[in-house]
């Protein structure tokens, strides 16, 4: 007789719960920032072209660094690399917050977005490869299911939180960037 399916098997492992929470915070923070930066760049420039470049500035580093980031995940501590990438993401968010608050040059915002893209390039492979290290093989499928659900939650909650923050701040994006910064820093702490 086969044993009953445990839908919470992965969640019974403390390290996995911490990794899941860190991953949710990282994703929510990224989505909050994505919503805020799109809003702010368009509000400040009224340029659809620059709005399109927002995505490109974040995507190109991921495309160009995918192989080196995967190699780094194979050669170095995945936890430390995930922490460093989230610290870099937090730095990018803090930079965007400062630029937003003081109405800094838009080109510097794009530099922060490139840094966020570099952080994302290194975050993703390290986050994914940590999973088998924190759950036993019999709970791995369950952990993947929880990760997928968490990612879906973050993709809905992040933009909603980013939009709500902008609305509450009377159209200013800086508080959203600050929240994204705290999400990244909390992720670093949870991984410690």
Image (spheres, helix red, strand yellow):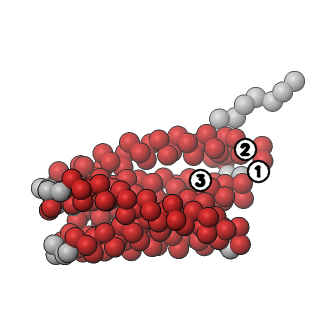
Q: Residue furthest right?
A: 1
- The percent coordinates of residue 184 (x first, y second) are 43, 65
Residue contact at pointers 1 and 3, CB within 8 angstroms: no
Residue at figure coordinates x 34%, y 73% from the top left: 111
Q: Within 10 Å of the Cα at label 3, are there few (<14), some (14-19), or many (20+) other Cα atoms?
A: some
The residue under label 1 is: 136
Is 116 in front, or is 1? 116
Is 156 in front, or is 99? 99
Q: Within 10 Å of the Cα at label 1, are there few (<14), some (14-19), or many (20+) other Cα atoms?
A: some
Image position of 43 with respect to 112: above or below: above
Residue contact at pointers 1 and 2, CB within 8 angstroms: yes
Q: Which mark is residue 139?
A: 2
Q: Secondary structure at mark 1?
A: loop
Q: Is residue 69 left or right of residue 153?
A: right
Residue at figure coordinates x 72%, y 44% from the top left: 139
Please say whether residue 122 is visible from this viewpoint: no
Residue at figure coordinates x 27%, y 75% from the top left: 108
First reached walking from the N terminus: tag 2 or tag 3: 3
Q: Within 10 Å of the Cα at label 2, are there few (<14), some (14-19), or many (20+) other Cα atoms?
A: some
Real-space CA distance between mark 1 and mark 2, rounded to the nearest whole angstrom: 6 Å
- The percent coordinates of residue 127 (x first, y second) are 59, 59
Real-space CA distance between mark 1 and mark 3, rounded to the nearest whole angstrom: 13 Å
Q: Which mark is residue 113?
A: none
Image position of 27 with respect to 187: above or below: above
Residue contact at pointers 2 and 3, CB within 8 angstroms: no
The residue under label 3 is: 17
Q: Is residue 145 left or right of residue 55?
A: right
Quadrant location, the N terminus: top right
């Amino acid at each position: 007789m086969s044993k009953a399916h445990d839908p919470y098997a992965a969640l019974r492992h403390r390290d996995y719960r911490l990794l899941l929470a860190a991953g949710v915070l990282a994703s929510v923070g990224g989505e909050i920032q994505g919503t805020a930066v799109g809003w702010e760049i368009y509000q400040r420039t009224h340029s659809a072209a620059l709005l399109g470049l927002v995505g490109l500035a974040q995507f190109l580093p991921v495309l160009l660094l995918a192989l080196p980031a995967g190699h780094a995940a194979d050669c170095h501590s995945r936890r430390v690399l995930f922490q460093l990438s989230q610290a870099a993401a937090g730095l990018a968010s803090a930079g965007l917050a400062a630029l937003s608050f003081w109405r800094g040059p838009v080109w510097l915002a794009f530099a922060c977005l490139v840094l966020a893209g570099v952080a994302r390039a290194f975050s993703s492979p390290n986050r994914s490869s940590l999973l088998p290290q924190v759950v036993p093989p019999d709970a791995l499928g369950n952990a993947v299911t929880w990760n997928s659900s968490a990612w879906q939650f973050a993709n809905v909650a992040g933009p909603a939180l980013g939009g709500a923050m902008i609305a509450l701040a009377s159209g200013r994006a800086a508080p959203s960037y600050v929240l994204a910064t705290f999400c990244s820093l909390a992720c670093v702490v949870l991984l410690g």
